[in-house]
Amino acid sequence: MRDRESFESANFESESGFDTESPPYILSTDFPFLVWPRFDWQGKKVLLIADSGDNIFTLWPLGVSQIVAVDIARKACFLNELKLAVLRKLSFSEFRKLFAPVYENRLIPRTTPAEKRSLYLKIRDLISSQCRTWLDSEIGVTDFPSPPWRELMFTHLIPHFNSEHAFNVAKDALKPYTLINLPIETALENSDDQYDVIYLSNIPEYIKHSLLMEERDSEISPVLEKLYALSMTRLKQAGSLMLYIFGDAVSQPDLCAHEVEIGEKLGLSLYREKITFSTPLIEGSFFTHTLIVMTKEKGK
């Protein structure tokens, strides 16, 4: 894992509201992989938010050539290291056990902290010393990594958690990838690389929420414009900037009003992919999220 400072002295700031010590998501809460197959990933170089690591493991089987994962939260980077090691070395059943909840539920059999510790020790030598230092004090000592209910309820959507076949496909396609512990804004500023796809997850939504909570509404558009413009400088001419919205931005275009306005200002084209799903834990449930895709228009 690469960063610009040691963890002890790092004090990164981001308008998203996340910081270096933000707790990690154990399981993915955004599900772009439900529509990943609609895009051409063969040979693509991708920069994305590291998050829980699950989005990364769904991309390798689609033929991407290189992945760079960025996260301001060091524990999210550590979780990525852990999942990468587990996916490499352990079986499907062991993978599910390590990331299963410690509480009773209807989706995955519960696992005790002691069982998690036993599995962790099998892959401990595959992770960095910084990662080991933190995980040694967590796994078997606390409930970590036990996903909260709001994450567990959509576990069935994540291919490598839901199916042994998909797990083996992900394992076979797995490659090493770069982890950078920085805010996405800083990582983009420091990079000279060019990417085919940049996936910002729902970081823009967090920025909007954070600035609204601080009564800085007027700063939302300038902050997002700076982020999107910076992202475009790191994209190849035919590249795509993707971001995730927790809502139906097709039926409710106000959800992406800032993106439409900024896209027009920057000379970008924008389209929206609906993502629909449900959960067996809520009878009759139906959810719609949106993947926003922004691309450079010809001549821009």
Image: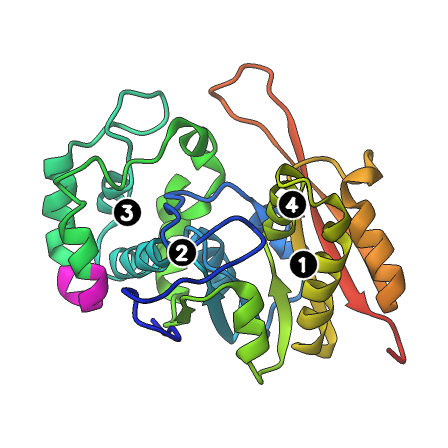
Disc 3/disc 4 C-alpha distance (Å) = 41 Å
- Identify the residue under disc 3: 92
Examine the structure image and report whether residue 129 is included in the region drawn in magenta: yes
Q: Secondary structure at mark 3?
A: helix
- The residue lying toward the viewer, choosing from 160 and 3, is 3
- The residue lying toward the viewer, choosing from 217 and 127, is 217
The quadrant of the picture occupied by the N terminus is bottom left
Q: Residue furthest front?
A: 215
Determine contact: label 4, label 2, CB under 8 Å: no
Examine the structure image and report whether residue 55 is included in the region drawn in magenta: no
- Identify the residue under disc 1: 242
Would residue 43 be visible to someone looking at this image? no
Q: Say if 70 sits above or below 213 in the image.
A: below
Disc 2/disc 3 C-alpha distance (Å) = 27 Å
In the picture, measured across the screen, residue 258 lies left or right of residue 224, that is: right
Q: Say if 149 sits above or below 9 in the image.
A: above
